Amino acid sequence: MNMPLNTTNLQRQHPCIAMAVVNVESLAKRHISEKLTNAKQLLDILFPLAQGSHNDVTGYMVYYQHLLACFADATLSGLRHPRQFIALSGHKTQPDALLLKHDSGCHLEMSFNHGGLIGCHDQSGLDDLQLEEAHNRGNRWISLLHESIDGHTSPQEMRKQFVDHEGLIYAL
């Protein structure tokens, strides 16, 4: 069971241990920040916005059939290539996941969770990016932000279901 660490008591009783804990936590946050920056750079390359960068997005929403990125100054931007937005999971104004498709045919899922391990560190709540790896036995997904216990990302075979622009089921 994970219990919250009382750093005040720890600092009083074991100042060296407390400093080490703070250093580890700061390293973990920096690592998450670097992962998010790299992931958003990938989004800017593969799925560029008409204006702005995914790094500055505070949230995403679907308006009619278009994906819109929301910025802190209340401006909005769609994708440079709107056809890359395929489907969503959750509500249009606050999706749980968005499905994008690159011209190469590869799908990418953006998952959001403001309370998630990574999403709590991101202004848009981006918790994971999963890249589809087409396989002759089915679809496998590789997480670009989460690692397995051994520290590596490994493809997971899973079926995913979304709702497309017209309200129809889009399954992978």
Image: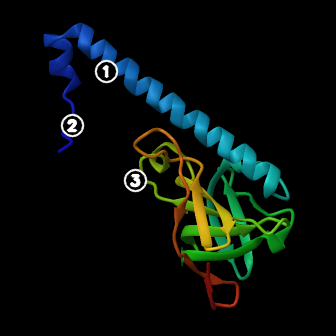
Q: Which mark is residue 21?
A: 1
Give how far across and how far down residue 105 sits, in percent.
79, 69
Q: Amino acid at mark 1?
A: Val
At x 23% / y 9%, what residue is drawn? Answer: 15
Residue 78 position (above or below residue 146): below
Q: Quadrant of the N terminus?
A: top left
**Residue 52 appearing in the image:** no
Q: Are marks 2 and 3 in contact (CB under 8 Å)?
A: no
Q: Which residue is mark 3?
A: 115
Q: Is residue 34 left or right of residue 148?
A: right
Measured in 3D between alpha carbons, the distance from the residue under mark 2 to the one under mark 3, in whole angstroms, is 16 Å
Residue 145 position (above or below residue 67): above
Q: Residues within 10 Å of mark 3 (few under 14, many from 20)?
A: few
Q: Residues within 10 Å of mark 1 (few under 14, many from 20)?
A: some
Q: Circle 2 — which element?
A: loop
Nearer-the-camera pick, 87 or 66: 87
At x 60% / y 49%, what residue is drawn? Answer: 144
Tell which circle, 2 or 3, labels the residue nearer the N-terminal end.
2
Q: Are marks 1 and 3 in contact (CB under 8 Å)?
A: no
Give how far across and how far down residue 152 sits, in percent.
51, 42
Q: Which residue is mark 2?
A: 4
